[in-house]
């Protein structure tokens, strides 16, 4: 083969791994000759290099490139390792990571992020428009999304949201200092979802009531619940209290005081236009009819100067024919300080008395005392001992007084045996329906017929011949039915719709004035013997209809008489609480199906305990403050500290309950090794460490030792230049140590 210069050789652009290159074996001492190496070995046998001097680098930038060794590949820039990949596939990047493009795919089982905050939508000029649609998407059979929707100004979830462990949904006030919230009860026996009404009620003061199946609707307060009131319950606009089983007056032994003033009568006064032009005003109400309770003392306070010349007294009649003075006390002069009239209501107080001015007529009204004594004089025009048999008609023009323990035996017969020409007021026992009944002048009804006496009665429905009728059952189309006494075909004519209590599928229906569907938007009206609903009840719906018999007033429930079971869930909100919710020591507020979150005070300490899952405290709109003179973060068992923050003192950080970091007024102390990928500055301010400059190529040290120094045993030290030991300074080099000056 003819000798050729290297410059004359043909350039090989794609060498094979088996191609051979000549090589001078310098490491072999220069004795090797005619050595060669394959192209594959040349590439696979490169030196390991280091982060500061990579094996593969660049002519103009020798400390930027790739180095290896120990199954680790290191990428360096400026002599510092920036990214490593080890044999386990672990990639470590020192510094920030910026990913461009439109899609970043992370195909791992778990993604752990140590950062406390993840920012989405971080564009050059962020706005609500650029944020629109941003959020999280979990892929499944269908996408599970949680996104910000600009049009609704809200976060929107495509799926249900479950709050575990009695956690709360909290709604903060304008400055985020307080909140109201919702939470689950401690124990839920079965799942329940409440369906809200589609619109707000048009009536102020209505509350939400459940139909027993989770469907909520607006109802008048107390219609489907037993509300508890403290103080005075006032009905505006001449309202009614309907449908009660009993009134319960609690005896307290205290004196009830009514504040009395005098004002010119208005149309609201019972006797407006009659008697005096002035009238009494009781507790701000113009001459109300009062209902009192036996056993109680009532004081009518006349200290206000408008009472001057109008002393209040009690009488058996409104025209003051007979004064009533039993258990009555007066004090002072009406209109002056301390003036009052007081009465103790007893069992012998007349059922009805009247409060009136002793100097002027018809300024007051009546009082019902609920006692056992009738008002007026009882006359006995006929005294009977034993039995009295009467054939024909027995007419009494006044009262009948019956004493003893017997009974009145009234006429009894079937429905067909009723008198052929009845008159109003007739009373008999119906042996067919086994009920007492009376005639009101137009129809028979149980215990007084249509002119109800206050006794409730169960009704049923029958087919009506009117428009919307034609069915004796709820069939989904009929909305008009005839009312009959339950178990009979006897028609009943209610006085008005309010006299009835109607429930369909467990939901109380609203009564309305009027006689047709055009007179209401929901509920029912009555027309003669018919009941007409606003729409046809569902086919097969369960129901009950009760004729209350009369419009009856209901009193305020007594103290401690209403249980929590009688209050509709969700009707008491934060604004219903006068001040605070007070709990005694060790009484807990608990959240979650398993009472997983508890808040309580033991008498000495306060506790906020979470027993499941993670516990998250977050403020999405501002700062989060944890206040305390000394704050300790520790393990759940309390036997291992994580961090301690001392008031006016150190901050301490721990690893496995061993303190590794502590601040002081001059800096911080690290116990153990402090590892850093880099530090800023030339290190000239550090003690015990030489400073490095010129990209780490030059190490500088001082030329004067000005402090006593003892080298570490069996260690070597080096300094450059002439070193001066200051006067009075001692440098000690122990046996086994070496100090070199170059």
Image: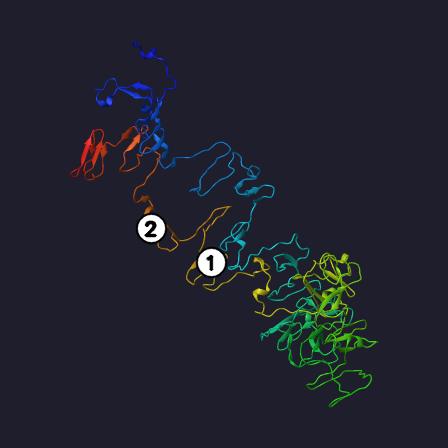
Residue 88, above or below 536: above
Number of numbered discs on residues: 2
Residue 62 lies, in percent from the top left, at 34, 25
Q: Which residue is mark 2?
A: 657
Q: Quadrant of residue 444?
A: bottom right
Residue 14 seen: yes
Kind of element beneath mark 2: loop
Extreme residue toward the left, this view:
735
Seen at 31% across and 32% down, the residue is: 69
Residue drawn at (49%, 40%) of the image = 119
- The residue nearer to you, when weighing 289 against 448, is 448
Q: Give percent across and percent down for residue 519.
A: 76, 58
Relative to 292, is 388 on the left or the right?
Answer: right
| Viewer-nearest residue: 683 or 472 | 472
Frontmost residue, 645 versus 16 = 16
Characterize the local packing of mark 1: few (<14), some (14-19) or many (20 or more) Cα atoms within 10 angstroms: many
For residue 545, above or below residue 399: above
Badge 1 vs badge 2, beta-carbon distance below 8 Å: no
Colour setup of the view:
rainbow
Q: Quadrant of residue 361?
A: bottom right
* Mark 2 closeness class: few <14, some 14–19, many ≥20 residues within 10 Å: some
Q: For this view, does 735 lie left or right of residue 247? A: left
At mark 1, the secondary structure is strand
Image coordinates of residue 348 in percent, x first then y, are 66, 81
Q: Earlier in the sequence, mark 1 or mark 2?
A: 1
Q: Which mark is residue 598?
A: 1
Residues under labels 1 and 2: Cα distance? 27 Å
Query: Visible in this render: residue 337?
Result: no
Q: Position of residue 223 (x, y in %)?
A: 65, 63
Relative height, residue 623 to residue 415 (above, below): above
Q: In the rendered image, which quarter is residue 672 located in?
A: top left
């Amino acid at each position: 083969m003819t000798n050729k210069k290297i410059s004359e050789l043909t350039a090989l652009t794609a060498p094979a791994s088996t191609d051979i290159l000549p090589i001078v074996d310098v490491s072999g001492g220069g004795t090797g000759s005619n050595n060669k190496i394959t192209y594959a070995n040349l590439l696979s046998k490169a030196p390991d290099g280091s982060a500061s001097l990579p094996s593969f680098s660049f002519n103009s930038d020798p400390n930027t490139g790739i180095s290896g060794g120990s199954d680790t590949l290191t990428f360096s820039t400026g002599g510092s390792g920036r990214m490593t990949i080890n044999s386990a596939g672990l990639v470590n990047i020192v510094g920030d990571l910026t990913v461009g493009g439109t899609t970043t795919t992370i195909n791992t089982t778990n993604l752990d992020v140590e950062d406390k905050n993840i920012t989405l939508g971080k564009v050059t000029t962020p706005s609500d428009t650029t944020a629109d649609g941003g959020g999280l998407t979990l892929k499944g059979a269908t996408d599970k999304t949680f996104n910000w929707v600009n049009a609704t100004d809200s976060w929107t979830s495509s799926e249900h949201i479950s709050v575990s462990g009695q956690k709360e949904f909290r709604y903060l006030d304008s400055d985020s200092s307080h909140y109201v919230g919702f939470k689950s009860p401690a124990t839920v026996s079965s799942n329940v979802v409440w369906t809200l009404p589609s619109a707000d009620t048009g009536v102020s003061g209505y509350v939400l009531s459940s139909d027993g199946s989770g469907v909520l609707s607006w109802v008048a307060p107390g219609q489907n619940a037993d509300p508890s009131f403290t103080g005075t319950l006032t009905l505006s606009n001449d309202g009614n209290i309907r449908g009660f089983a009993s009134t319960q007056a609690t005896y307290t032994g205290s004196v009830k005081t009514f504040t009395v003033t005098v004002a010119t009568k208005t149309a609201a006064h019972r006797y407006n236009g009659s008697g005096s032009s002035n009238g009494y005003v009781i507790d701000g109400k113009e001459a109300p009819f009062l209902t009192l309770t036996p056993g109680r003392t009532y004081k009518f306070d006349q200290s206000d100067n408008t009472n001057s010349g109008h002393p209040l007294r009690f009488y058996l009649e409104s025209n003051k024919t007979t004064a009533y003075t039993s258990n009555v006390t007066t004090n002072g002069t009406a209109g002056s300080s301390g003036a009052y009239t007081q009465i103790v209501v007893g069992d012998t107080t007349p059922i009805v008395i009247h409060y009136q001015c002793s100097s002027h007529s018809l300024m007051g009204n009546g009082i019902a005392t609920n006692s056992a004594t009738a008002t007026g004089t009882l006359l006995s025009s006929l005294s009977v001992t034993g039995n009295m048999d009467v054939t024909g008609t027995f007419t009494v023009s006044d009262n009948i007084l019956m004493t003893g323990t017997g009974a009145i035996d009234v006429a009894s017969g079937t429905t067909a045996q009723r008198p052929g020409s009845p008159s109003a007021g007739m009373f008999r026992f119906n042996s067919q329906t086994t009920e007492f009944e009376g005639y009101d002048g137009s129809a028979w009804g149980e215990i007084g017929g249509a002119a109800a006496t206050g006794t409730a009665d169960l009704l049923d429905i029958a087919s009506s011949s009117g428009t919307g009728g034609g069915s004796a059952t709820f069939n989904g189309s009929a909305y008009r039915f005839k009312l009959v006494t339950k178990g009979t075909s006897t028609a009943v004519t209610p006085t008005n719709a309010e006299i009835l209590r109607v429930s369909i599928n467990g939901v109380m229906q609203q009564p309305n004035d009027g006689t047709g569907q055009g007179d209401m938007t929901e509920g029912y009206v009555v027309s003669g013997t018919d009941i007409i609903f606003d729409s046809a009840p569902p086919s097969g719906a369960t129901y009950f209809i009760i004729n209350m018999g009369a419009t009856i007033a209901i009193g305020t429930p007594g103290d401690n008489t209403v249980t929590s079971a009688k209050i509709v869930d969700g009707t008491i909100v934060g604004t219903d609480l006068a001040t605070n919710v007070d709990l005694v020591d060790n009484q807990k507020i608990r959240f979650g199906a398993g009472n997983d979150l508890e808040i309580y005070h033991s008498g000495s300490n306060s506790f906020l305990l979470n027993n499941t899952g993670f516990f998250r405290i977050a403020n999405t709109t501002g700062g989060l403050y944890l206040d305390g003179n000394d704050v300790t973060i520790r393990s759940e068992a309390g036997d291992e500290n994580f961090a301690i923050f001392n008031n006016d003192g150190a901050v301490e950080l721990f690893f496995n309950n061993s303190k590794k970091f502590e601040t002081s007024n001059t800096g911080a102390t690290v116990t153990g090794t402090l590892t850093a990928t880099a530090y800023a500055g030339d290190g000239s301010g550090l003690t015990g460490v030489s400073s490095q400059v010129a990209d780490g190529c030059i190490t500088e040290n001082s030329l004067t030792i000005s402090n006593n120094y003892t080298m570490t045993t069996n260690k070597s030290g080096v300094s450059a230049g002439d070193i001066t030991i200051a006067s009075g300074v001692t440098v000690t080099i122990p046996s086994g140590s070496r100090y070199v000056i170059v």
